[in-house]
Amino acid sequence: MILIMRLVCLTLLSLFGQLIAQAQLESDTLTVTVISYRNFQLDQVQIGIMAITPAETTLDEVLSILQPSGAGLDSLTFVYSYFYPDRPTETDWLFVIPVPFANLKDKLAALTRIQGASPWDVSFQVQGVQSSPESLASNPCVFTHS
């Protein structure tokens, strides 16, 4: 919800700026454009978890194995099946979960345990960093017009 509000705010700012730029100004006017970038606190790591399973594996089965990682339906990014003529068909499941920096060590330990106990090929990697919803909410986009 916070992200949507930020996108709406940025869109409004962009549209307002375009309207001003298109306005007819008198020849003796000066136009000043100010751009302010917010300094958001990056406080989370995005971890991608890939599980490669036989094609007949269900989502519920994958989630039951990955459950200790915090992966769930809301973090499922894509599912893709590969068909090979010379070996069994497999399905790739990618989940991306946000992890606070403070919890990174524990989360990596949990993922390592899942990796060792899983009947399938499970791998994970850092995919980026982001600001948590709480961090974004603490620095709201304020748009004023007079």
Image (spheres, rainbow, N blue to C red):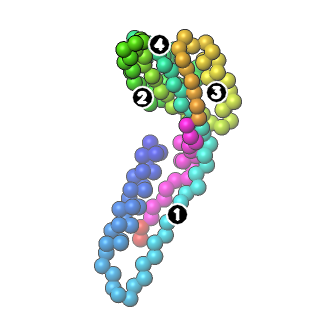
Local crowd size for mark 3, using a 10 Å CA cut-off: few (<14), some (14–19), many (≥20): some
**Distance of label 1 from label 3 (alpha carbons):** 35 Å
| Residue at position x 47%, y 15% in the image | 53
Q: Earlier in the sequence, mark 4 or mark 2?
A: 4
| Residue at position x 35%, y 72% in the image | 21
- Residue at the disc numbered 3: 107
Above or below, 131 against 121 in this view is: below
- Residue at the disc numbered 4: 61
Q: Is residue 88 left or right of residue 19?
A: right
**Distance of label 2 from label 1 (alpha carbons):** 35 Å
- Residue at the disc numbered 2: 78
Q: Amino acid at mark 4?
A: Glu
Local crowd size for mark 1, using a 10 Å CA cut-off: few (<14), some (14–19), many (≥20): few
Q: Position of residue 67 (x, y in %)?
A: 54, 19
Q: Amino acid at mark 2?
A: Phe
Q: Earlier in the sequence, mark 3 or mark 4?
A: 4
Instruction: Count every numbered label the image shows and give the total.
Output: 4
Q: Amino acid at mark 3?
A: Lys
Q: Which residues are magenta?
A: 127-144
Local crowd size for mark 4, using a 10 Å CA cut-off: few (<14), some (14–19), many (≥20): few
Element at label 1: loop
Q: Nearer the viewer, mark 1 or mark 4?
A: 4
**Distance of label 3 from label 4 (alpha carbons):** 21 Å
Of residues 43 and 81, the one drawn nearer to the viewer in this rendering? 81
Q: Earlier in the sequence, mark 1 or mark 4?
A: 1
| Residue at position x 59%, y 35% in the image | 126
Q: Position of residue 79 (x, y in %)?
A: 41, 25
